[in-house]
Amino acid sequence: MARYTGPVCRLCRTEQTKLFLKGNRCKSDKCPINRKALPPGKAPKSRQAKRSDYAVQLREKQKLKRTYGLMETQFRNTFEKALRMTGKTGENLFGLLERRLDTVVYRLRFASSRAQARQLVLHGHIAVNGKRVNVPSFTVKPGDEIAVHATAKKLGVFKDSLQEFGRSGVMPWLSVDPDNMVGKFNAVPHRQDITDMADIREQLVVELYSK
């Protein structure tokens, strides 16, 4: 299974924004984007010229794709599925991305980053409706119960990650019982509810793939 294995902080610098790919490090002073204003490369100043419409659309797609930790084929397949659904394609795309099991695990504060959530799912530490699921792209449905598997509840990673629940809670379409490490996916979120992705212009992604 293909996945990006390079330095993730470089991706944030490329997109010139925090993609929150390393959990708590992204919120600290250690985040490289706080210290390096220019994108990576030998001659970054030459890249400051006005960008074409295609370049703007491409950067928006890359930003969204990298935030959710998907490779190009995975992201394109998700877009094609959103295109076949009724309603606005951009909103459908966000709905599908937020229904991925690794994203739900991250949103429930069981992991400090989507990459960590993906790893926890792959290792079989997560159960959906009582059954262990090890596929990060598994589509969660409204009403599904997502829990830390009984054999993994003693792992420190979950206790450390759940501290964030006490500080900021969870998104409105989710509910969590932190003591029992159980969460519930109550509904597919509306676009306006995904407040931490407010700067993403999904219409540009739709325009890019529609060419």
Image (cartoon, grey):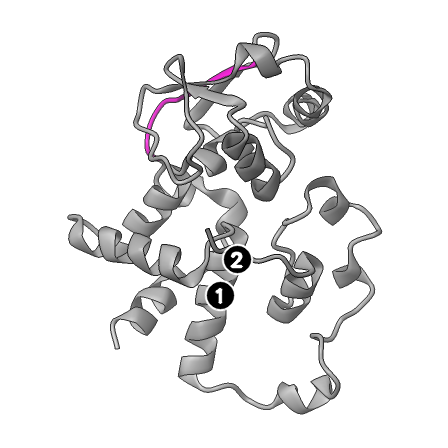
- Please report the residue visible at 64 percent of the width from the left and 86 percent of the height from the top: 48
Marks 2 and 1, Cα distance to the nearest angstrom?
6 Å
Q: Relative to 184, is 64 above or below? A: below
- Please report the residue visible at 65 percent of the width from the left and 56 percent of the height from the top: 18
**Residue furthest front in the image:** 1
- Please report the residue visible at 45 percent of the width from the left and 24 percent of the height from the top: 174
Label 2 residue SS: helix
Label 1 residue SS: helix
Q: Amino acid at mark 2?
A: Arg
Give the camera-side residue of 210 and 128.
Answer: 128
Q: Quadrant of the C terminus?
A: bottom left
Residue 12: which disc? none
Q: Measured from the top left, where is residue 158 in percent x and y?
A: 65, 22
**Proximity of marks 2 and 1: CB atoms separated by less than 8 Å:** yes
Q: Measured from the top left, where is residue 159 in percent x and y?
A: 69, 19
Q: Which residues are magenta?
A: 181-188
Residue 208 falls inside the magenta stretch: no
Residue 66: which disc? 2
Q: Relative to 202, is 39 above or below? A: below
Q: Which of the 4 image quadrants contains residue 120?
A: top right
Residue 62: which disc? 1
Q: Relative to 145, is 85 above or below? A: below
